[in-house]
Amino acid sequence: MHHDIDQLRRFYYQRALGRVVQRILRDRLTGRWAPGSVSGMTVAGFGFAAPMLRPYLAPARRVTALMPGPQGVMGWPAGQPNRSVLCDETAWPVETGSLDRLVMLHGLETSEHPRELLAEAWRCLGPGGRMMVMVPNRAGLWAASDRTPFGFGRAYTTGQIEAQLRRAGFQPDWHGSAVYIPPSDRRFWLRSAQFWERSGARISRVLIAGVILVELTKQTRAPVGPGVRIHVPSPREILDGVARPRPRGAPVAPAGRVVQSPDRPPETP
């Protein structure tokens, strides 16, 4: 079940609780990826990641907000040339290997094709490219409430989301959590949100966060699993060819080994 663009926009830009969540998640993101660190880079977001991307508009070479078709699209950023694009979640209008940084928010948990979505993210990221995924925490209060966008789609534990991302060819480098306040519009929680964020990491056994964040690097080594088969001759085979030349196109003795082509993205179950 995909989110509706109007509901997302109202939550993050018009509702006080949503603006607090936006600030919390953006602070966590910029704490990992400082705006100055993306100077000259190509940055993109998928799902409804636009609220996270604003700090990178000035330093990055290019910033694009990719929004899936079933969700809908809005013009972004306000008052500036549009940088948002409506796209198929499994076929982005992005050149292969062209992204340096990718943020995924409200994209994976509602996707009808999560395996293909992650394969598309893998395709678009360049070697050493980094991705930040933000998903609802299965153990948190936010996943149990349908009054916010985090109450829809699949919720995850840290182990579950990292396992899924590893199968897609990404290496988890860091994970964290955020949004320790309950999904409430009461002023007490909104005003004390920063206090709970600072305290949450120290007392996480008592306070359960609403959002899990995972930072990943694209793996570029040859993946394990079925794929394009390439024959690599063994040393004996090469020497046999010198001693006893074979006609062109003659079958090769089964002495070599078969490896996976490194040009294919990893297969996911």
Image: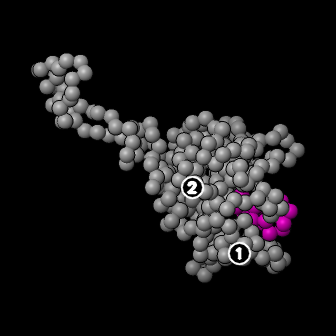
Q: Amino acid at mark 1?
A: Ser
Q: Amino acid at mark 2?
A: Pro
Front in this rendered view, residue 227 or 133: 227
Residue at 32% over, 40% down = 259
Is there a contact, CB below 8 Å, between mark 1 and mark 2? Answer: no
User: Which dot marks residue 114?
Assistant: 2
In the picture, measured across the screen, residue 33 lies left or right of residue 166, that is right
- Would you say the magenta stretch is mainly helix, strand or loop? helix
Residue 98, percent across and down?
A: 60, 36
Quarter of the image containing the C terminus?
Answer: bottom left
In the picture, measured across the screen, residue 124 lies left or right of residue 81, that is left
Q: Quadrant of residue 212?
A: bottom right
User: Residue farthest to the right?
Assistant: 79
User: Residue farthest to the bottom?
Assistant: 206
49 in the magenta segment = no
Which one is earlier in the sequence, the residue at label 1 or at label 2? Answer: 2
**Start and end of the magenta stretch?**
13-26
